[in-house]
Image: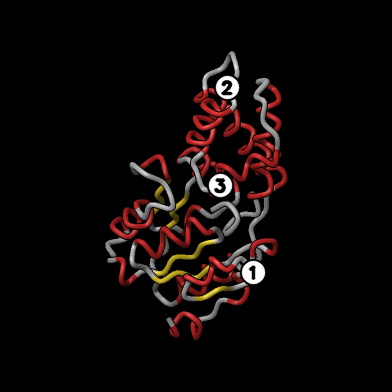
Amino acid sequence: MDGLLLDTEPLWGECMLRVAQHHGIPISRDKFKETTGLTIYEVTEYWAIKYPWSGASSIQVADDILDDIIATAKIKGSIMPGVLASIDMLKKEGYKIGLASSSTTRMIDELITHFDLKQYFDAVVSADMVELGKPHPAVFLSCAKQLNSTPLESVVFEDSINGVIAGKAARMKVIAVPDEIHYDNPRFAIADKKLSSLEELSMNLLRTI
């Protein structure tokens, strides 16, 4: 969801820093890369171990960040270019569409409802519905199961390295759509295709994989 469907990825750092400062957590923006790909509850648990503070629990801090990111995303977030056209194309071609995200169920539901995307998904799986988050393939495998599909019938769209790894570990085809800053990261080479935007997606491209 974040960074592929919705332009909310840059907002995470803003919200995490604001809440961390509020709780007196001794962490700076440059440290966020240490927890890339973790769920927000894993992030704050990591902070509690490496950057301990007094007062609120790591769970409370994570809940506060979620409240902040949801409210901020509704104001500053937007649907990424090519999303609606791609969904429309896939639906017309008879594809089932699932959403598998590292975000929490609460955040997913609030944002896809706010941005009027909920009706497009035949299944929704969040990291808090499975035992392990990305790069473990559990969210993708669970989503495929809900779609009554097999991994070998599935295509994953991902903007992150951990998501691409999870998709390949699930034995699914993977189309990477990295942001501009990370587009040339060589680790995206494991994806079956790489696009600069979902505006480049076509049925001809899908058929090639």
Pick whichever, 134 or 1, lies toward us.
134
Point 63% across, 73% down: residue:
199
Q: Which residue is mark 1?
A: 184
Image quarter of the C terminus: bottom left
Residue at x 45%, y 70% (from the top left corner): 91
* Residue picked out by circle 2: 52
Which is more toward the observer, 175 or 77? 175
Amino acid marked by disc 1? Asp
Q: Residue furthest front?
A: 50
Q: CA distance from mark 2 to mark 1?
A: 35 Å
Q: Position of residue 26 (x, y in %)?
A: 67, 26
Relative to 61, residue 109 above or below: below
Which residue is pictured at 59% across the width and 70% down the height? Answer: 198
The crowd level at tag 3 (other Cα within 10 Å; few <14, some 14-19, many 20+) is few
User: According to the image, label 3 marks what residue?
Assistant: 36
Q: Is residue 73 above or below residue 139?
A: above
Q: Earlier in the sequence, mark 3 or mark 2?
A: 3
Q: Picture coordinates of residue 174 (x, y %)?
A: 45, 69
Where residue 67 sits: x, y (%)?
Answer: 60, 31
Q: Which three-letter amino acid code belongs to the residue tagged 3?
A: Thr
Left or right, 179 with respect to 140, comes to: right
Disc 1, SS: loop
* Badge 2 amino acid: Pro
Mark 3 residue element: loop
For marks 2 and 1, the one nearer the N-term is 2
| Relative side of 101 to 131, left or right | right
Secondary structure at badge 2 equals loop
Q: CA distance from mark 1 to mark 3?
A: 18 Å
